[in-house]
Amino acid sequence: MLSIRSVQAIVTAPQGINLVVVKIETSEPGLYGLGCATFTQRCLSVATAVEQYLAPLLAGRDPDRIEELWNLGMVHSYWRNGPVLNSAVSGVDMALWDIKAKCANMPLYQLLGGKVREGAAVYRWANGRDPRECEDRAREWIEQGVRHVRIQCGPNVGMPYGGLRLDRPEGALDGDYYDPADYMRRNLAALQHVRDKLGPEIELIHDIHERLRPADAVRFARELEPVRLFFLEDALAPEDIEWFANIRAASAVPLAMGELFVHPGEWMPLVSRRLIDFIRIHISAIGGLTPARKVAHIAEAFGVRTAWHGPFDVSPVGHAVSVHLDIASTNFGIQELFSPGFEGPLREVFPGCPEVRNGYLYASDRPGHGVDLDLTAAAKYPHQPGIDRWTQARLPDGTITRP
């Protein structure tokens, strides 16, 4: 009988961003699976959870029993639904699905019900310091066939979620300062400019990144109605989800939510009450493909579409699993895809990255999810230590706040 021989966590940073991938080897020589366990801000904690706790728990067990092993991984620690545990379980879960699809000699999407589309439309980031720069970046993507662009305007192009103010109090601590009022003014102007210049055919997206107080988010959503967004992303923090009813009552702007969700109690009320239009969970943060496919099915019953989180801190393995689910889900909406794509060292470390062409992401037709891992290449890009600055977000008076 096929059994799990080893479970290993690999931390690698081919683009300077820490990624965590789980490799499960089986008793059949050469048969292994890979899964994404990336929680970049706490990557070593995830790796420890995989190797010190899940590996001995899973050794010798049957890899075909995915549902059994997912639930075992979740309940064995007694406390559950935290991002470290969820990410560790996700790496195992995706790897088990990879193994099962390889055993079936099928691409993963076949095990999920088969294709309902050939490729998954993606949206790309068009960040700029002013409206014209946002427009220019959007046009660059449009020339590459992209029809959905996310517009973000701010002084920091790399993390443009708010304007800066330098009139902080004396002695205020260092951090990533931003001014919510300045942020709203900048981005409303940028979105209106881009819509006027690009016309109605291009779909525009904007991400609040949960940086507004609920009442300001309600007002901002109402002011954005004339822009005709494809969706407004993460308008509120998970702690404030009850306010989505207020936004829904005040504005017709489509809403997407879920980047920080780790617990079913966070997304289920929004879906079942039809308070959002898109669910955009970070798949590894909820435990992998097994729960994500259930989220997609439940969302479909309530008319909610998927828009899985797809930033820099998702490995190519995680992106591959997302696109297999995208092309097998009737209620797929859009797939986020980081810029610039799967190039350079990332492709060196992860042979078989998903293909991006003319605004679409394509899944591999090879057995499994199609992405491999070159351990020698991964070792060339070791874990990057350091303390994130952008998650030390502060309001103009120096108050620490949610990033």
Image (tube, grey):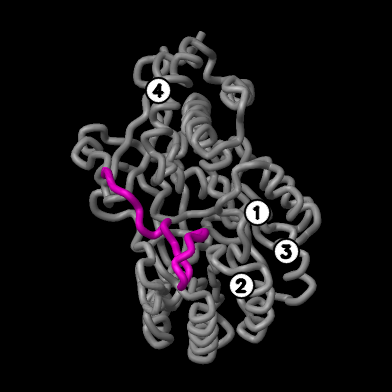
Q: CA distance from mark 2 to mark 1?
A: 24 Å
Q: Which residue is mark 3?
A: 244
When the figure is inspected, residue 391 is found, relative to residue 262, above or below; the finding is below
Residue 230 is tagged as 2
Sort mark 4 into few (<14), some (14-19) or many (20+) by Cα contacts within 10 Å. some
When the figure is inspected, residue 306 is found, relative to residue 92, above or below; the finding is below
> Can you tell which of label 3 and label 2 is closer to the viewer?
3
Where residue 385 appears, as percent x and y from the top left, is: 27, 43
In front of the other: 398 or 130:
398
- Return the disc, 1 or 4, that comes first in the chain's sequence: 4
Q: Which residue is mark 1?
A: 239
Q: Which residue is mark 4?
A: 51
Question: What span is colored magenta in the figure?
Answer: 384-403
Where residue 341 appears, as percent x and y from the top left, is: 35, 58
Where residue 316 appears, as percent x and y from the top left, is: 39, 46
Q: CA distance from mark 2 to mark 4?
A: 42 Å
Three-letter amino acid code at disc 2? Answer: Phe
